[in-house]
Amino acid sequence: MSVSQRVAPPIDSLSSAARVAGSIIAFAYLLGLVPGPLVSVVGGLALVTFGRALLLPEASARRSVLSLAVLAGALGVGALRWGTLDLPELRGVQSVLGPTILIGPEAAAIACGLALGGGLVGLGAWLLEPRAVTRGDYIWAGLEVALGSLALVTVFVDPARSVLQGAGFGLAAFEIARWLGAVAVAVAIVFGASILQARLSDRWRWLVLGAAGAAVAAAAGTVSVAL
């Protein structure tokens, strides 16, 4: 056995390290523990995707990366809608005006809803592989889907409303419950989309992912024109 073989970490260990590191980074920004840009969340998701891709054959890894691109594009549409990549600003404007998907002009609101749908479908495609088999696999899948869903909810559905800054206990508890409920609904949709896509042939999976990407691209074009 060569020296390089002796010192090289197992692929599964490297994969786990990347997924843990990426999840910590993304959750830290999404939960407001660290202020910063949406790009940092996408970077954390990219690191998670890298860890997942290490466990996949080349074709599946390629689809996983493209799924991330669809998700990142959807998040970008939300940022484009408000003209900022700063997460505190995205939360702040929604705390005043309401959820991104409900704020006019009508064309922009519909486009943001389309982008959110494309992002959820892309996240469902991202979840397909590596396939969960063991209890640990399902825990990984749950945490990572919660991460992607939280990112979409943060950008499109106004989860925070800054209620923890001086709000009373009752209002804060209500808003936190609403926030968790929105994430739970998004997670359920993603799992449903993933289950449906798992029943498709490989060709149809690519077509579904392509349609999600096209929806996000159309949404981006509509938002840029509408604003």
Image: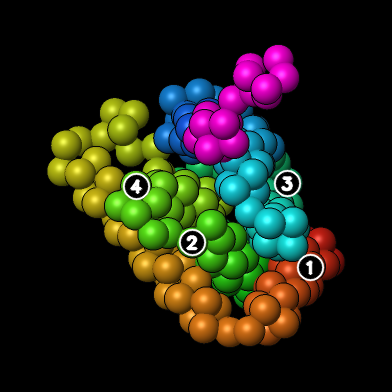
Location of mark 1 (residue): 217
Q: Is residue 22 above or below residue 63?
A: above
Real-space CA distance between mark 1 and mark 4, rounded to the nearest whole angstrom: 35 Å
Residue at screen point 68% across, 57% down = 57
Instruction: Indicate which disc, 1 or 4, sits on the residue closer to the N terminus.
Output: 4
Real-space CA distance between mark 4 and mark 3, rounded to the nearest whole angstrom: 40 Å
Q: Which range is magenta?
A: 1-18
Residue 136 numbered tag: 4
Quadrant in which residue 63 is drawn: bottom right
In the displayed structure image, the side of residue 55 where residue 186 appears, left or right: left
Instruction: Indicate which disc, 1 or 3, sits on the residue closer to the N terminus.
Output: 3
Residue at screen point 34% across, 47% down = 136
Q: Nearer the viewer, mark 4 or mark 3?
A: 4
Real-space CA distance between mark 1 and mark 3, rounded to the nearest whole angstrom: 17 Å
Q: Nearer the viewer, residue 55 or 156?
A: 55
Question: The C terminus appears in which quarter of the rendering?
Answer: bottom right
Percent position (x, y) of residue 3? 71, 15
The type of residue carrying mark 3 is Gly
Instruction: Indicate which disc, 2 or 3, sits on the residue closer to the N terminus.
Output: 3
Q: Nearer the viewer, residue 218 or 101?
A: 218
Dominant SS type (magenta): helix
In the displayed structure image, the side of residue 70 where residue 51 appears, left or right: left
